[in-house]
Amino acid sequence: MTAVTPLIHQSASTTAEFTIRDVIEGQTAGHLIVAADDWGWWTALLSGESIVPTTGIQQTVADGLIRAGFLARRGHRYQLTHTGHDVGKNRGFVRVAVRGWEPTFRQVSDSAHREHISAATDPGAVALGCSDIARRKPEFFAGIGHAIATGTPGCTIDLGCADAGRVTALAGLAPRERFLGVDIEAGVIADATTELAAKGLSDRITLLAGSVQPEAEPPAWLDRVDRDAVTTAMSFFLLHQLASDGGGITPVLRGWMDWFPNLRRLVIGDGYLVEATSWTQQPWFSPTYEIYHSLTGVRLWTRQQYESAFADLGWSIARRMEDHTMLVTTILERE
């Protein structure tokens, strides 16, 4: 995974070349970042707390994060550096690349004779990472929550909801709204449903397992939904793949509009295609994103292609929020 952590230190305008040291340090740091996240360190550190390693393994990870420049020691406690703050905010990206997509990259060595390889992911890691990516900008969620809460209460559906982290967060921002989440990973949905019940949110949030790709025949889960009640549809980090498999962005969006005839708002978060001759000229996550999808035969789409599809279907951009240039969340509305 050569494009994970070294680029955390480099801006899109950097023209330096990678070295062998960058490659090795990047892979090592990426794994340490994920381990620290599993222990809850980044959450604590970003809230202003310091951490104290209590075992030999924790001490080794903390020392590595110091040497990477992400932590600083203050007596026997550890605090974030400025760079560490950025790393903590971006840990969802790192998790997807280091853990979620690693099974796919592992296939490459034995697949030289093939045009593409099938995506082989860790569904739990991808779900958690994507949920973290979508939530890493609180102001983005505040904007989405405000848009939902301002209008007449209805039902918001998250198409490709992962671990339900997004709908859970939005339920606190729009207390009169009901929420649905659908994801193709049944195991992820089962775990998330159990967690929602433990939090007492089952009465406001319903999760269903199934595909959200529009096909000739509607998916089975749609029979369990009050389709007329859905007024907001969201999708994060999935539309590019559905569009690649389904003939383009417009057919997918039109399919969702057919499913839910009273849609008045779309929230689309996705990664846009950002090309450059050198990886160091791209946003730091862009090379991994681009190569992963090239290997699996999934087409990526430019900002112009997304916005043309929105306009063709009668949607107006109410708000656009950019993160790392390539990751864009767009709130779309129509009469």
Image: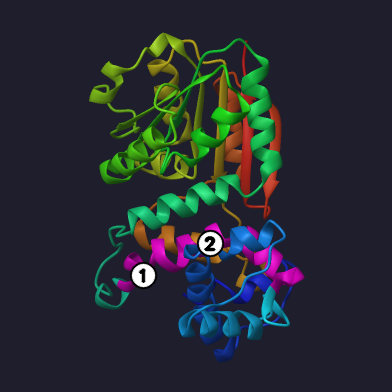
Tell me the number on the disc at residue 105.
1
User: In the rendered structure, which segment of residues is drawn in magenta?
Assistant: 79-106
Q: Amino acid at mark 1?
A: Phe
Mark 2: which secondary structure? loop
Question: Image quarter for residue 110?
Answer: bottom left
* Viewer can see residue 198: yes
Mark 1: which secondary structure? helix
On the picture, is 332 further left or further right than 102? right
Which residue occupies 36% across, 70% down? 105
Q: Amino acid at mark 2?
A: Gly
Residue underneath mark 2? 40
Residue 221 image point, x, y percent:
27, 24
Count of number-bearing discs: 2
> How many angstroms separate mark 1 from mark 2 (CA)?
27 Å
**Depth order, front residue of 9/114:** 9
On the picture, is 308 further left or further right than 58? right
Residue 68 image point, x, y percent:
64, 82
**Depth order, front residue of 144/268:** 144
Residue contact at pointers 1 and 2, CB within 8 angstroms: no
Which residue occupies 72% across, 71% down? 83
The dominant secondary structure in magenta is: helix
Tell me the number on the disc at residue 25.
none
